[in-house]
Image (cartoon, rainbow, N blue to C red):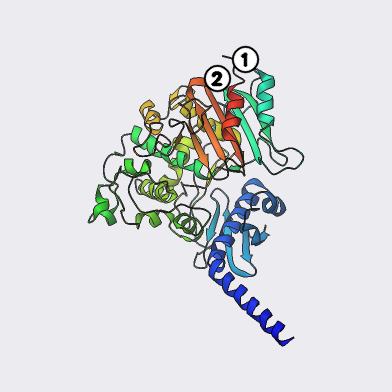
Amino acid sequence: MKKFLKLLVLVLVLTFLYFGFTTYPKLDLISGFSAKSVASGHFLDHRSKDLIEKTDNDIDMIDLATNSINDAGKFAVSNVYGLKERKAIYREGLGATLINDDFDISKPYLLPKRTKLVNNLPFPYGNNAPKDTLFSNIDYTKLKSAVENSFDKDGGKTKRTRAVVVLYKDKLIAEKYDTGFNKDSKILGWSMTKSITSSAFGVLAKQGKIDIYKPAPIAEWKNDDRKVITINDLLHMNSGLEWEENYSTICDATKMLFQAEDMGKVQMDKPAQFKPNTHWNYSSGTTNLLSRILRAQFKNQQEYLDFWYSAVIDKIGMNSMIVEQDMSGTFVGSSYGWATPRDWSKFGLLYLHKGNWNGEQILDESWVKYTSTPTNTSEGKYGAQFWLNAGGKFPDVPRDMFYCSGYQGQMVAIIPSLDMVIVRMGVKEEEPGFDFNGFLKGIIDSVKK
């Protein structure tokens, strides 16, 4: 019996040590992810805690978190086994922000001034009901089958698509939502937000207010190798700065999103590993640094907040969109843009038409060409905050497709040669989860040659 008890004690000690070594350092990130996800999903899209836990937070280790929502106080709290409690607050107009213990929730804050696009036009150029249009060259049976096949059946969790929207020649030709979601559901685009950030720079460039080919205006870089890094290098993820982006472990990206007060500063403080324009390296920190740089272009915080919406988002009627902030008041341009699938499709339409929105040139055509041209060393897969199919990542899809892409399989696909925009929102990445090539091919094949 004594031997058994000693063995049991030894097992418990070893288990505790293993937990302390492998899991405890992750608890802060787990509870941080969970609190932020619950607060955003509940207050922005009115999802229940149960739905969020079952469909947003059912990720390995994230599902260890225990969550609670305070509707009166407008915040969510999460912990893991009672440890590492984190809190995310919600502010109308700003969305949810993950905060630390030092954050002053009583401090006044500014809100973006929004102007809702109001006209009598049908979707997508207005917010009225889409106009019924039948195209003789569309095989609607094939189209319907392709869209339906992207969704799970009978409660399955293999494909996990939440929404599909297809625009063809400026008309809505297909739309479908999973149970619990509809055309008014706001869905997180994750890294599709990077393309929104790029667009803000595009408008500034069109206005002649910024030169992206000049060194980035960062005082901390002026006396070292980083002084030659340009905004163009940053937009192309080609700056040579050190960065690790691996969501399966503790890395620069996860620490930034779930611990940092000033997310843009995390990448700013990293040293140079390579000369600019020689090593492509995907970095969410780079996009948040770009958002921080953008903030410095304005006289005050109010102008910065307003610009994102007045220049692009509300200009094209993406009135559902909210881009959330970090604790410092900078938009999390890498990851935290929420909008309805229909509004995400409007953004794709803007780029499909080379920056023109219903007759108004919001972005120069040259900017759209710039964003969709492969950057050096990316093997044809990345432009300026947009992903590309130039390298043939999707073999059955036209090579001219470029797209916004986000964690868990968010996509706004822009296919100029077909005059088509395809939006897919979900909680499943590519194969062995979701077959994006097959999904896109099925929709494309419905267009008769």
Which quarter of the picture shows residue 435? top right
Which quarter of the picture shows residue 373? top left
- Which class describes the residues within 10 Å of circle 2: few (<14), some (14-19), or many (20+)? few
Of the numbered discs in the image, which one, if any, rests on residue 91? none
Instruction: Identify the residue shown where x is 64% and y is 53%.
Output: 57
Q: Amino acid at mark 1?
A: Phe
Q: Which residue is mark 2?
A: 169
Whether residue 114 appears in this view of the structure is no
Which quarter of the picture shows residue 123? top right
Q: Nearer the viewer, residue 327 or 112?
A: 327
- CB-based contact (under 8 Å), mark 1 and mark 2: yes
Which residue lies most toward the right here? Answer: 154
Residue 231 position within the rendered picture, expressed as x and y whole percent measured from the top left: 32, 43
Instruction: Identify the residue shown where x is 65% and y is 39%.
Output: 161
Quadrant for the C terminus, please: top right
Q: Is residue 133 left or right of residue 407?
A: right
Q: Which residue is mark 1?
A: 135
